[in-house]
Image (cartoon, helix red, strand yellow):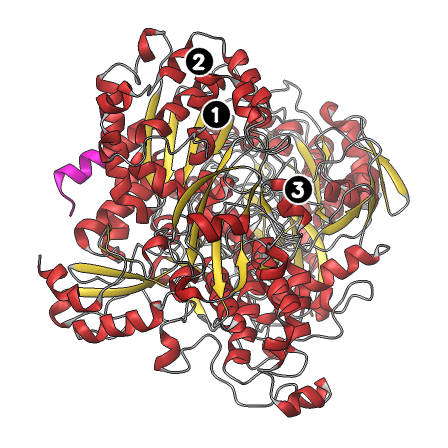
Amino acid sequence: MPAILTRHTDDPEQTELDVAQRRGAYDGLREALSRSPDEVIAEVEASGLRGRGGAGFPTGRKWSFIRPVPGQPVYLLCNADESEPGTFKDHYLLRRDPHLVLEGIAIAAYAIRAHTAYIYMRGEYASLAEIMAKAIREAQGAGILGESCLGSGYDLRVSIQLGAGAYICGEETGLIQSLEGKRAYPRVRPPFPAVHGFLDSPTVINNVETLANLPFIMTEGAARFAALGTDRSPGTKLISISGAVARPGVYEVEMGYPLLELLRHEAGGVRLGRRLKAVIPGGTSVPVLTAEEAAPVMIDYESMQAAGTLLGSGGTIVFDEGTSMPEALLRIAEFYAHESCGECTPCREGTGWMAWVLRRLVQGEGRPGDLDLLLRVGHNIEGRTICGLGDASVQPVRSFIQKFREEFEALLPREALAAPAWQMHGHGPRTGRFGPPGEEAALSDPVEGPPNAAL
Amino acid sequence: MPLVTIDGRQIEVEQGTSVIQAADRLGVEIPRFCYHPDLRPEGNCRMCLVEVDGYARPVVACATPVADGMVVHSPHESATASQAVNGVLEFLLVNHPLDCPICDQAGECSLQDFYMHPDYGLHESHVDPAEKVHKHKRVDLGPRIVLDAERCVMCSRCVRFSAEVSGYAEVQFVRRGNRVELVTFEDRALEDPYAGNLADVCPVGALTSRDFRFKRRVWHLESTDAICAGCSTGCNVRIDHFKGKIERVVPRRNPSVNRSWICDEGRLSHEKAQGQDRLLHPRGADGGELSWSEAIARADALLRGGRAGVPGRALLLGSASATNESLLLLRRFGELAFTQRTMDFRLGNEPELVDAREDHLLRRRDKHPNTMGAIHLGFAAQEGGLPLHVRAAEHDAYAALLLVYHPPLVGDESPEAAGALERLIRAVPASVVLTSHRLPFLEAATLLLPVAAWAEEEGTYTNYQGAVQFTGQALRAPGAARSAVAILADLLERVTLRRPDTSPKTLFVELAQAVPAYQGLSFATLSSRSAIAYPPEGRMHYGQEGFAGR
Amino acid sequence: MLSDEALREIEACKAEESRKQHALLTALRLTQAERRHVGPQEVLYIADLLDLSPATVEGVARFYDQITKEPTGNRVLSICRGISCYLCGADGAAREAAAALGVDQGGSQAEGRVTIRHVECIGDCDHAPAAMLDSTFIGPLDPASLSALIER
């Protein structure tokens, strides 16, 4: 399998600058600096590289929206907040090839005429930040970064900002807010970050994996990159595969590679030889696929879309036959309820409401109409929020219920299935809203109670 | 300029105008919590969702700029928008305590109003009232504001006001998701001198005014538009009153004067205006109460002995808190009654302070609403002011004094001015004082005439910018007190033997003729909104500097 | 209240950009690391340091899960409850871990030595059930070896 990103990641010494440089690290930056920024943008546009953070927006196009304003800085922000459940590909790159990421950052910054770049890393990646900080120090010491990168006259400062535990910081305007030292409430668009971003300056936010593709594009050329993968999804993709799988891990595959092929061969199949029940192919924010639906799906943006889901972050979560889908969905819904920033109404109230209804369902206290209620709440969230978290929270709920409805219905009390909704409404045993119903549930209660506080 | 169609009606607006602004201009009602014309849009409440032709999903009207040819459908005519707004309303009630019967916001609660709206209201809720996230209730945030965090819809208007407008940044959200809660740090009391605005911007019952809480249901109130008399800024306010008593004063939006804000001192200044120490009856030097006919006759006799054009060297001291109309009559009386007269209004250094800021927002150091008007009406022709007049009086320069006096409604009269006034009154043989309040330094006057205080008399004030603004009468003056205009008209009638027409309209026409700066102003423009007149030297011209302190 | 090293780092962060608030997240992180919590005194201290209102600092502090109002133990064991870890038996492992350390779930061991936090996906799903001891990834969580790990 052709590799762009993981060529050297098996060698622990790849984190050392001299080792990495012997293998061509920063050759791509040297190439970029020998051209004009616009030429670099054109090369990347020609490569067809699309954002690997989840949205798949063409990277070169994103850069071309930047219009520097005299007297105002331009910023490049590297999104290393990787928080999408089931995704750990950036973790892999940051740990194993920090100079590849750093080189990508420098190329992108040069292209958009930024002289300051921040790597925003989730707080849980503090140990990776140390690796990254060492790489920055080495690169600065070697004259690669800092003043006059590689003797080109182009200056670039790269800093690391660690987060402190909030999923929403991976959303690009949430990230900007957090970097500004604020509550990471996403911003309403327009204006877009390319115009009013970090500290109101033109800003590009690129994902770690996206940036790590740039050295290859600069050294090997857009054509060689575009020759990989499919027509509309060129290049490779890092797939983090986890859950009920024999060999969980990060695998680089050429776009267009069959999803189940990856599961069976590279990842060793479903663990304990069990049967596949379902798979989420792009992090929890995309619709789940049943085993049957997953069979023909290829790992590329178009094939995923045709199957009714999304490539997303490439976080592939495997569910085996023994999994209770309602319980798994409850866990996912609790994640979104916990992580909703609370800024806009539908997401703030809707994610909590969905988690609450799912919890009573799983606890055997479901009410008639609960499944339709969940779908209706989802409908009222979708498309009506400031950022994508609202939509993301709806995808698992809707797809799980649609595709595994009988499992959910089996949880409803028998009389609840028969009785008209109005008769049951407001009756039945109840636990406090989000209050831990008992010791058992305390572990999975994401919402109230101080999970982080010491006693 | 882009042409936009909203619910079938077209309007051309400037580039950058948002859909909600265009709709407001057209008079198409778009429901909203977080949007406020004087705060940066945040788009968080999602109540202003509208359908736009060619857009896949509803968009928020507050943060969507209009584009030429855009066709917008509000929830009044779009089922898609109506359903979206309805869904948002339902979400807002998931954790709302539904305690309307005991909520003092009733009658002016946006949530309640939207809930009942026929086009997008929520008539079938799936919310279970038993399951709520609980938050802090009835938190005293100092003398002005009470917080009920459960009623909060997290629209962040108060947070934005506090951070961006007043700059105190004292209210903030904590936590995330449906646990988000509005707090002050450790429940501290607000120090913001503009804290009252937090209750004004709150669209629901989360932040309520402690002064007004449970005093009165809002639908029982009568309202009168007025101008705050607390300083020279001239903030536009609305007086809400009930049976002759002011229940509250709230800001009225005027983008070029006070936007949507007033300071707490101004908000409460009515307490002093309508306070305990009012002068209720005309009173002679002996302390005896007089009827008005006796009082007017005695005033006339004291000032000019019943003769017009007396060469009496009179001092006419106007008030920078009097209306332009009363100052006009005072001036005319001076001109007709005396061959020699000195007119002034300066008790301190009002003219120097008139546009001096006390803070970055609204408050000014000149605590009089009409210093500019007094200047425009020629009340400070000579150098010197009050100290000069005291010295002159003590050298027997004046035979008579006619003083119109209103105490400042914010703060007290300076001891220097009070002392000087007392010396002046004692030095002049005949002193007639029109005052709203009983004050020790006026006690020595030969004749005290009770005059209406702020909100008891209509007329115009000219603010520091030169904006001529109409202030209404909300209350009847207490006791026998009368408007300054009425009293001065009586005195004039003694001179001319003909009572002047004191209707506001006539007086304003005369004012516009008498003051060069006011030429071209008409009462019609004045009553709709404040007319802006520029002082002769043009130095008070209104510009962006008015709010540059943000 | 903070070490010279932390103060230097905050100063450096402040100097990076024109707005001091940019350094707030860093200040909160360093305070949490050194003082094990960001309580009212810490909020006032940071507010003073960065010229912000206490409410602003409080609002940001209470947004992030890793900043705590109450002090944590000397060590923090973060156990992932992400979907992948859930599928790999995280609930059971967490119960066993709590029992092995003699800590209430979501609480601290006696003398405030260890705090257990249940956290959302920490991005180490290939080592499910994933966990972190302070900032070190220690998945897959092995309750039996925890005590030894913490002693080290």
| Rendered image: mark on residue B63 | 3
Q: What x and y, as percent, mark residue A106?
A: 39, 21
- Spatial CA distance of label 3 from label 2 is 39 Å
- For badge 2, the amino acid type reads Ala
Q: What x and y, as percent, mark residue B8?
A: 91, 45
Looking at the rendered structure, the secondary structure element under dot 2 is: helix
Q: Residues within 10 Å of mark 2 (few under 14, many from 20)?
A: many
Q: Is residue C36 left or right of residue A221?
A: left
| Predominant SS along the magenta part | helix
Whether pointer 3 and pointer 2 mark residues with C-beta atoms closer than 8 Å, the reply is no
Farthest residue, direction bottom: A415
Residue drawn 30% across and 32% down? C14
Q: Chain of mark 1?
A: B
Residue A108 inside the magenta-drawn segment: no
Splitting the image into 4 quarters, where does residue A418 fall? bottom right
- For badge 1, the amino acid type reads Gly
The answer to whether residue A207 shows anywhere in this view is no
Residue for badge 2:
A32
Residue A290 lies, with reference to residue B516, above or below; the image says: below
The answer to whether residue B212 shows anywhere in this view is yes
Residue drawn 66% across and 42% down? B63
Q: Which of the two labelled residues, at mark 1 and mark 3, occupies the earlier sequence position?
A: 3
| Rendered image: mark on residue B384 | 1
Q: Is residue B295 left or right of residue A125?
A: right
- For badge 3, the amino acid type reads Ala
Q: What x and y, as percent, mark residue C55?
A: 37, 52
| Rendered image: mark on residue C26 | none
Mark 3 or 2, which is nearer the eye? 2
